[in-house]
Image (cartoon, rainbow, N blue to C red):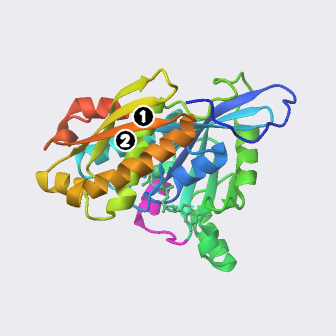
Amino acid sequence: MDRVARAPLTPLEGPTRCGFVALLGAPNAGKSTLTNQLVGTKVSIVSHKVQTTRSIVRGIALDGAAQVVLVDTPGIFAPKRRLERAMVSSAWTHAADADVIALLVDANRGLDEDIEALLGQLKDIRKPRALILNKIDLIRRDSLLALAAAITEQVPFDRVFMVSALTGDGVEDVRRWFAETVPPGPWLYPEDQVSDAPMRMLAAEITREKMFLRLHDELPYRSTVETESWKELRNGSVRIEQTIFVERESQRKIVLGKGGNTIKTISTESRKEISEIIEQPVHLFLFVKVRESWADDPERYREMGLEFPKGG
Ligand SMILES: Nc1nc2c(ncn2[C@@H]2O[C@H](COP(=O)(O)OP(=O)(O)OP(=O)(O)O)[C@@H](O)[C@H]2O)c(=O)[nH]1
Ligand SMILES: [Mg+2]
């Protein structure tokens, strides 16, 4: 994805730096919100539902002479089903490959089993790491300090940050530390590139986000969206066709809504946002298909950039 305007860069000083930062955390901690805030534009979808991020999204942030590749991972929790296992194992694989690790904790939720389990595994990964307490807009300062102490007692961190990914409060300091901490080396991406995800994939993710936002808890999170075709038309607009896969006929009806109203709204909202990002008019066509066992189909995992875990 490119062609996205962001704030002008400070001129390059000194030798360049470049590296990968894995953002780990429980579902809903705000990893995708922070990724977008650090990059300066939307590269990863966000919703109030847990387990929004499925595949790995690499957002690219710049700070002075440093290019920081942010690896936004799916939330880590105790996985049960196949799709969940694929998501969690992909998060750990990317943590192992990263130069720097950041653990994001929802400060409003505090220290619970999910975080305890995460801390247990983090102990053994020897890399520069930061603890980022997020959502400080929702909580008092004194309880933040207690939470930071409780966590760093278990696992030492090189730095502790307190931020609101939503408002951007404190995020500058995080970006600066990442920039100083990634190793020296040439940039991996052109300077105007903000993500490594192809636009087709982001467009599918945006539709999934609109669907989540509209349907709240009526629709289980086990639905997926794929971009089937993307045609640049002569008049400068783009024609996009996407398929929403659900698992049951009853879910298809929910997505369509009365008289097709729900899908119309999802389509309008998604079209608007895709169009803003690519700065071209968009014609979006959505189809809803029932595929009972999509979550057991290796092909769907490949589309999401996940490894298909063996066994049920
Ligand atoms: N008040 C407040 N809400 C936040 C903040 N950061 C994120 N949120 C909200 O928290 C919810 C989850 O945010 P996401 O960025 O999708 O969280 P995530 O960690 O990527 O979640 P998964 O992808 O499901 O693992 C959304 O409703 C966000 O708007 C923050 O700093 N303050
Ligand atoms: Mg996410």
Instruction: Give the image location of residue 44, x and y in percent.
Output: 50, 45
For the residue marked with disc 1, what is the amino acid? Answer: Met
Please tell me in which quadrant of the rendered image residue 105 appears: bottom right
Quadrant housing the C terminus: top left
**Residue 17, image x, y percentages:** 74, 29
Q: Is residue 211 above or below residue 179?
A: below
**Residue at label 2?**
89
Q: What crowding class fits label 1: few (fewer than 14 Cα within 10 Å), some (14-19), or many (20 or more)?
A: some
Residue type for callout 2: Ser
Instruction: Residue 70: give its label.
Output: none
Secondary structure of the residue carrying tag 1 is helix
The magenta span reads 108-119
| Residue 288 is a magenta residue | no
The Cα–Cα distance between marks 2 and 1, rounded to whole angstroms, is 21 Å
Crowd tier of the residue under label 2, counting other residues whose Cα lies within 10 Å: few below 14, some 14–19, many 20 or above: some
Residue indicated by mark 1: 201
Quadrant hosting residue 309: top left
- Foreground residue among 21 and 267: 267
Horizontal relation, residue 179 to residue 79: left or right = right
Q: Residue at x 57, y 64 (%)?
A: 151
Q: Is residue 274 visible?
A: yes
Q: Is residue 115 magenta?
A: yes
State the residue lying farthest toward the front: 235
Which residue occupies 55% across, 47% down? 23
Q: Judge whether 110 appears above or below 21 on screen.
A: below
x, y percentage for residue 92? 44, 42
Q: Residue at x 39, y 27 (%)?
A: 230
